[in-house]
Amino acid sequence: MVGIIEIAKDVAGKAKVSQKAAESVIRETLKDIVKNVDRGQKVRLAGFGIFSRRKTKARKAKNPRTKAIINVPVKNKFHFSASGSVKYK
């Protein structure tokens, strides 16, 4: 699995900046994406995809251990929809 540090190394080499600077930019970009999505905005990165929040409906589910029926509340899930150029490579 590749993490932020590995991506920052690659970006730093291509952008000719320090790895620390590249990592900082990546982390701040991700924070801004989450912040805007939490405000109810959709964040579209052309050629990559769209970040948004989607509400799930309340529902009933069964606890697999006890077999008891439980109520699952409405959730506001983080969602990513990849663009076609990412999906079909």
Image (tube, rainbow, N blue to C red):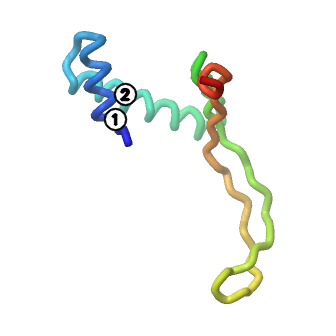
Horizontally, residue 15 falls left or right of residue 80, namely left
Label 1 CA crowd tier, 10 Å (few <14, some 14–19, many 20+): few
Amino acid under disc 1:
Ile
Q: In this view, does 18 lie above or below 62?
A: above
Residue of label 1? 4
Tell which circle, 2 or 1, labels the residue nearer the N-terminal end.
1
Secondary structure state at the residue bearing disc 1: helix
Distance, label 2 to label 1, CA atoms, is 7 Å
Q: Quadrant of the N terminus?
A: top left
Residue of label 2? 26
Amino acid under disc 2:
Ile
Q: Quadrant of the C terminus?
A: top right
Horizontally, residue 16 falls left or right of residue 74, namely left
Label 2 CA crowd tier, 10 Å (few <14, some 14–19, many 20+): some
Q: Indicate the position of residue 56 as horizontal and vertical percent values.
A: 75, 54
Q: Which residue is drawn at 73% across and 86% down?
A: 68
Q: In this view, does 89 lie above or below 69?
A: above
Name the residue at the bottom extreme.
66
Q: Quadrant of residue 26?
A: top left
Q: Residue at x 57, y 23 (%)?
A: 48
Q: In this view, does 80 lie above or below 55?
A: above
Q: Is residue 50 above or below residue 18?
A: below
Q: Indicate the position of residue 11 as horizontal and vertical percent values.
A: 31, 19
Q: Nearer the viewer, mark 2 or mark 1?
A: 1
Q: Indicate the position of residue 33 as horizontal and vertical percent values.
A: 51, 31
Q: Quadrant of residue 80?
A: top right
Q: Nearer the viewer, residue 39 or 8?
A: 8
Q: Quadrant of residue 10?
A: top left
Callouts 2 and 1 close, C-beta under 8 Å: yes
Secondary structure state at the residue bearing disc 2: helix
Q: Which of 3 and 56 is in front in this view?
A: 3
